[in-house]
Image (cartoon, grey):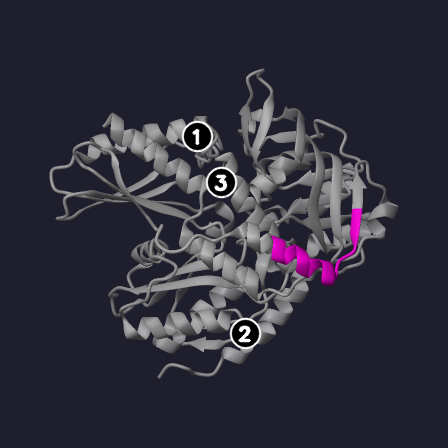
């Protein structure tokens, strides 16, 4: 079991820090399709740089390492109880080593266990089989994309598509709608797993199981193969694009499975996964506990360095964006000069704030002066160096829409001028940006290493009682880049893309599968 624990630790670290080859090839193909000089092209360039940095640093690709979910097949007579203990020890060790973010939170008290262990965490599912080796698969699925999962009960009326019936064409409409409703909030371009049938629980389980398939496999069920191909072709016509910025690629993979249902129920369950598709697997010797083979590593390597050179050459020929540098404290005049589409580079101080901080600030004073300052929707992975100083190990943005009930009021209350996150915010925040003189900046979701490199020094931390991800970190940055997607003049790129994609979605209303 000691060797098995070591093998599980290696699997966790590799899954968190090293994207599998099939995912890399899908991202590379998307990068080739995108037009040079666009926001989507810039985003994909950042994404590929982040992938390489995670490799080199052996640090999390994305700071949100999700709820570790293990799917394990074992020979008869293997001790599953001892295996589970070893996996939990490996998870705790990986968390201590900053390869996983501490994400296990008591649902009632909000207390973070600090080691990713607790009731229901990690998720470990066993299945016996007649092979002579142990098959272990692991997926790390962050909260941003998990929150865009969706389940349909047919028949249903769907926005832009009309009635979806209890047939293959109704299923088609559900899948297309699932991509539309995710917009950029799940860190598009994404991968989806679809479960047809079952009950509400088994349908979602099947959808997540589909995410363990290779991105390049072919469905043996002819009807489902045609459905997958249809979705891949047409979902990318919606124009949502990378990060919801608009563009040629919205979906990188679609895998569909089916199980039986009861006559009264017809569920279509969709599990949305971000571009940072962190799932790996290993074959393990049941006697020695050692890894025999790594899974999802077939096929060619992707040379992102070569692609970077080609992209840089193309960018010199075509640049569509205006670039601005800001440093807090920021004035209202500086904010009013910004427009949607501007690329902003930030130097100086910023302060992290997520769900717990926003709720806290509603009823309390801020621990630091936030007038003219920048709030970053981020729950970083942090560690201490040899001198005992905090350092940032991974720090990409979290999905901002969760803060919609608070954001506008808090900006006005404390004089905050800029908010950084991903996926955009709603009408209430947009109105507040106009009234107060504020701006929303969209950072590249999942680019945790890219942004961690910009963070020069942790100047302090407050409200650590909320746990590392939810505390307020005060960080000095240099060269932190994000895109203006909501400005103080009532403009919202997110609203524009959503409206355009809904119009395009309506083109797929007519039946396709008989």
Q: Is residue 320 magenta?
A: yes
Q: Is 160 on the left-hand or right-hand side of 350? A: left
The residue indicated by pointer 2 is 505
Residue 433 position in % (x across, y down): 77, 51
Residue placed most toward the observer, 368 or 210: 210
- At 58% across and 67% down in the image, what residue appears? 248
Rounded to the nearest angstrom, the CA distance separating label 1 from label 2 is 42 Å
Q: Which residue is mark 1?
A: 95
The reply to whether residue 296 is visible in this rendering is yes
Is residue 448 positioned above or below 202 on the image?
above
Q: Element under label 1? A: helix
Q: Position of residue 321 (x, y in %)?
A: 75, 58
The location of residue 29, given as percent across then percent down, is: 50, 62
Under circle 2, the secondary element is: helix
Task: Check disc 3 and report the residue beneath it.
Answer: 55
Marks 3 and 1, how far apart at CA = 18 Å
Q: Estimate the spatial distance between the alpha carbons at disc 3 and disc 2, rounded to whole Å.
A: 37 Å
Are there few (<14), some (14-19), or many (20+) residues within 10 Å of tag 3?
some
| Residue 30 location (% of width, % of height) | 53, 62
At 79% from the left edge and 44% from the top edge, which residue is drawn?
A: 325
């Amino acid at each position: 079991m000691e060797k098995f624990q070591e093998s599980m630790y290696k699997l966790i670290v590799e899954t968190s820090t090293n994207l599998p080859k099939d995912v890399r090839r899908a991202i590379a193909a998307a990068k080739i399709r995108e037009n040079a000089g666009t926001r989507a092209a810039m985003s994909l360039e950042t994404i590929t740089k982040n992938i390489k940095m995670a490799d080199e640093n052996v640090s999390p690709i994305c700071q949100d390492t999700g709820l570790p979910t293990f799917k394990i097949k074992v020979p008869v007579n293997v001790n599953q109880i001892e295996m589970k203990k070893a996996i939990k020890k490996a998870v705790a060790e990986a968390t201590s080593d900053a390869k996983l973010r501490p994400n296990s939170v008591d649902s009632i008290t909000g207390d973070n266990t600090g080691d990713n262990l607790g009731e229901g965490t990690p998720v470990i599912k066993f299945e016996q089989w007649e092979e002579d080796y142990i098959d272990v698969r692991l997926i790390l699925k962050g909260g941003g994309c998990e929150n865009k999962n969706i389940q349909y009960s047919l028949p249903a009326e769907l926005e832009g598509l009309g009635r979806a019936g209890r047939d293959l064409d109704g299923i088609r409409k559900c899948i297309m709608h699932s991509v539309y409703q995710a917009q950029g909030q799940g860190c598009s371009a994404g991968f989806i797993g679809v479960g047809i049938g079952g009950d509400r629980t088994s349908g979602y389980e099947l959808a997540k199981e589909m995410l363990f398939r290779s991105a390049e496999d072919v469905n043996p069920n002819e009807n489902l193969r045609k459905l997958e191909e249809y979705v891949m072709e047409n979902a990318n016509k919606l124009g949502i694009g990378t990060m919801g910025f608009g563009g040629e690629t919205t979906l990188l993979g679609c895998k569909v499975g089916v199980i039986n249902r009861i006559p009264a129920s017809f569920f279509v369950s969709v599990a949305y996964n971000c571009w940072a598709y962190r799932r790996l697997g290993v074959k393990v010797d049941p006697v020695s506990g050692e890894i025999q083979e790594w899974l999802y590593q077939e096929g060619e390597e992707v040379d992102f360095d070569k692609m970077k050179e080609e992209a840089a050459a193309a960018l010199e020929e075509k640049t569509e964006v205006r670039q601005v540098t800001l440093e807090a404290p920021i004035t209202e005049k500086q904010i009013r000069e910004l427009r949607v589409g501007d690329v902003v580079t930030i130097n100086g101080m910023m302060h992290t704030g997520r769900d717990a901080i926003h709720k806290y600030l509603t009823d309390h004073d801020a621990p630091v002066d936030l007038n003219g300052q920048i709030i970053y929707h981020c729950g970083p992975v942090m560690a201490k160096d040899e001198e005992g100083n905090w350092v940032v190990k991974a720090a990409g943005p979290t999905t901002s829409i969760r803060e919609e009930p608070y954001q506008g009021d808090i900006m006005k209350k404390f004089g905050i001028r800029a908010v950084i996150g991903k996926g955009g915010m709603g009408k209430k925040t947009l109105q507040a940006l106009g009234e107060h003189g504020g701006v929303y900046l969209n950072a590249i979701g999942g680019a945790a290493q890219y942004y961690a490199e910009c963070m020069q020094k942790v100047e302090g931390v407050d409200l650590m009682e909320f746990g590392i991800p939810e505390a307020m970190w005060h960080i000095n940055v240099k060269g932190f880049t994000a895109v203006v997607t909501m400005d103080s003049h009532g403009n919202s790129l997110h609203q524009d893309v959503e409206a355009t994609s809904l119009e395009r979605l309506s083109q797929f209303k007519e039946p396709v599968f008989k």
